[in-house]
Image (cartoon, grey):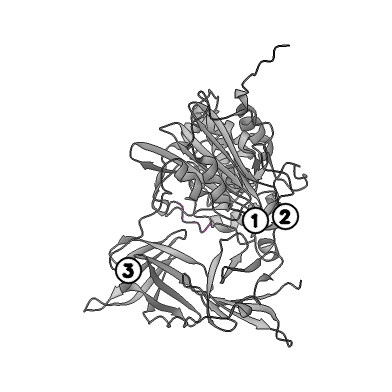
């Protein structure tokens, strides 16, 4: 018998006629993922086709390997689907972008209709509605739980809409709002007289051929192919949704999302072409991201190339999609690793992550502590020629210049205006927020702690898990002689010792005092940041 060797070309993705990502994509992906639990699935599409890359496992190495068909929670990338549904609904003359959202959410005879007319579908889709990031009635145990949106229903959403919409300053600024997109999705679905889930499946998933993608709705089981949600290397529950589904409930795979990308980039014919183009149209400048905003999409230019992108995050998953609309190529990364995928996605397309202009020549002139009340101060610091602001008990925000001595807080509808004396020295500031102006004099920042070194035997006493609540766990690790702290869903932060049981961060205003029991064993810590304290007890092994 004569034996013939037949080359199995179909087993390889690096042949002519296939997509052409950077040749070292797999190496870059593996390096980015490292050796931590979890993994990632990458889809690359261009005019030559599509190709997939994967790394890691659902959880530990003994769990199933990640594949192009592994499901992930894509978080806020759901918003570009909600925006596409809006655009398609306008194309079919079911709604208009300038329609007031109250028309579809409240009865026609409702006395609130007139006062709420200012919030339109367009203002919601471009984050210009003035609605807050989250509503006031998403609070308490619900907001701090590991499944924060599961029991938030349509009645809750309408109550919050009535409360916040009256005072909303529409069009004043772009303020990212999950709440706004929840309202938007409910309104568009109401225009069709169906649920958001039904509208999404009929008008988007069916024409796109996305047969497996689905929403993580309360009462529906998680699919077997859903990667384990991980935070800091440990498992966290899958998120479930009701009224907030349009803001972040979608679960999909790299293979299914490749269908979406090919339609968006016009690499394949699609009945949604006109709707996609409407979502990519520039609607307003977005200086906080260094570009513009479309319908949900963040837009920017590099040379002659036009890009659109969005990212997403849940408790245990991270995602990003970036489209080079000029070169007709795109990359998607779905991951359950506790690190931002943007640092990999943008370089694969040969472009840096867009960023606002925050650098100023005289940043050091503004550094100081500015008390606005006995209980609240603004801490202004400088890093690499940029200014950072941190309010008492709050997180740190970057500032971008808008005029001489005036800055906007990135991600918050607030501005800071500095004051000078006759000699040109900075003497105070005024915080402009919510229509109020609050002044504060300038004081010197307290000196930083003195750095010291501790024996390796002492450092070895601190690693472990420190839950501040059931929902929020800190992990302390020791790596090559350095202690690190990692909050749930956030990157690791190195700590520097200032004494036994006393540590601080060199990069942000954060100090930690470890506590001990009567036997001298570390049993918890007190974290101090921005004037607030968080206590966490160590998990007993």
In this rendering, does residue 320 appear at all? no
Label located before the other in sequence (2 or 1): 2
Residue 349 image position (x, y, % from top left):
45, 40
Q: Please, what secondary structure does the residue beneath circle 2 have?
A: loop
Tell me if label 2 and label 3 are in contact, CB under 8 Å: no
Q: Residue at coordinates 68% horizontally, 84% vertically from top-left?
A: 516
Q: Where does the N terminus fall, quadrant-wise?
A: top right
| Residue for badge 3 | 363
Checking the image for residue 21, the label placed there is: none
Q: Please, what secondary structure does the residue beneath circle 3 have?
A: helix
User: Disc 2 and disc 3: Cα gap in Å?
Assistant: 43 Å
For label 1, the crowd category at 10 Å Cα-Cα, with few meaning under 14, some 14 to 19 and many 20 or more, is: many
Label located before the other in sequence (3 or 1): 1
| Residue for badge 1 | 315
Label located before the other in sequence (2 or 3): 2
Q: Residue at coordinates 46% horizontally, 83% vertically from top-left?
A: 450
Q: Which residues are magenta?
A: 166-170
Q: Please, what secondary structure does the residue beneath circle 1 have?
A: loop
Q: Is residue 440 left or right of residue 24?
A: left
Residue 351 image position (x, y, % from top left):
41, 44
| Residue for badge 2 | 237
Q: Nearer the viewer, residue 451 or 430?
A: 451
Furthest-bottom residue in this view: 518
């Amino acid at each position: 018998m004569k034996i013939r060797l037949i080359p199995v070309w179909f087993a390889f993705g690096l042949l002519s006629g296939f997509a052409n990502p950077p040749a070292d994509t797999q190496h870059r992906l593996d390096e980015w993922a490292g050796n931590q639990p979890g993994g990632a699935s990458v889809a690359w599409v261009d005019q030559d086709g599509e190709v997939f890359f994967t790394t890691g496992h659902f959880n530990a190495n003994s769990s199933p390997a990640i594949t192009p068909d592994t499901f992930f929670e894509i978080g806020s990338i759901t918003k570009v689907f909600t925006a596409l549904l809006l655009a398609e609904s306008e194309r079919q003359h079911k709604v208009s972008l300038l329609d007031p959202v109250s028309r579809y959410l409240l009865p026609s005879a409702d006395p609130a209709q007139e006062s709420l007319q200012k919030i339109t579908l367009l203002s919601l889709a471009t984050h210009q509605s003035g609605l807050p990031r989250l509503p006031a009635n998403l609070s308490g145990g619900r907001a701090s739980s590991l499944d924060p949106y599961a029991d938030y229903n349509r009645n809750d959403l309408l109550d919050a809409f009535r409360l916040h919409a009256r005072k909303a300053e529409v069009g004043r600024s772009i303020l990212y709002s999950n709440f706004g997109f929840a309202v938007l999705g409910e309104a568009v679905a109401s225009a069709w007289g169906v649920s958001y889930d039904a509208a999404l499946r009929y008008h988007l998933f069916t024409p796109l051929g996305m047969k497996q993608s689905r929403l993580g709705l309360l009462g529906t089981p998680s699919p077997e192919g859903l990667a384990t949600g991980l935070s800091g290397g440990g498992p966290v529950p899958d998120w479930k949704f009701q009224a907030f589904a349009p803001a972040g409930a979608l679960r999909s795979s790299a293979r299914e999302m490749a269908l979406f990308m090919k339609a968006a980039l016009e690499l394949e014919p699609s009945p949604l072409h006109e709707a996609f183009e409407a979502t990519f149209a520039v609607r307003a400048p977005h200086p906080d991201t260094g570009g513009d905003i479309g319908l949900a999409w963040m837009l920017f230019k590099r040379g002659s190339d036009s890009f659109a992108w969005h990212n997403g995050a849940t408790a245990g998953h991270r995602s990003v999609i970036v489209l080079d609309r000029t070169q007709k190529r795109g990359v998607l990364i779905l991951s359950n690793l506790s690190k931002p995928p943007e640092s990999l996605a943008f370089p694969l397309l040969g472009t840096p992550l867009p960023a606002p202009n925050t650098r100023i020549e005289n940043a050091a002139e503004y550094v100081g502590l500015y008390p606005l009340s006995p209980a609240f101060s603004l801490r202004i610091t400088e890093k690499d020629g940029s200014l950072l602001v941190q309010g008492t008990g709050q997180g740190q925000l970057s500032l971008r210049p808008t005029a001489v001595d005036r800055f906007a807080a990135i991600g918050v509808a607030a501005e800071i205006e500095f004051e000078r004396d006759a000699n040109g020295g900075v003497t105070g500031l005024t915080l402009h927020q919510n229509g109020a102006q609050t002044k504060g004099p300038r004081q010197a920042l307290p000196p930083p702690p003195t750095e010291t070194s501790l024996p390796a035997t002492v450092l070895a006493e601190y690693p472990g898990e420190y839950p501040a609540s059931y929902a929020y766990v800190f992990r302390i690790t020791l790596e090559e002689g350095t202690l690190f702290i990692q909050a749930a869903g956030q990157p690791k932060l190195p700590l520097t010792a200032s004494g036994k049981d006393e540590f601080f961060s060199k990069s942000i205003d954060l100090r930690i005092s470890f506590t001990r029991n009567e036997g001298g064993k570390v049993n918890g810590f007190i974290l101090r940041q921005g004037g607030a304290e968080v206590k966490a007890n160590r998990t007993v092994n």
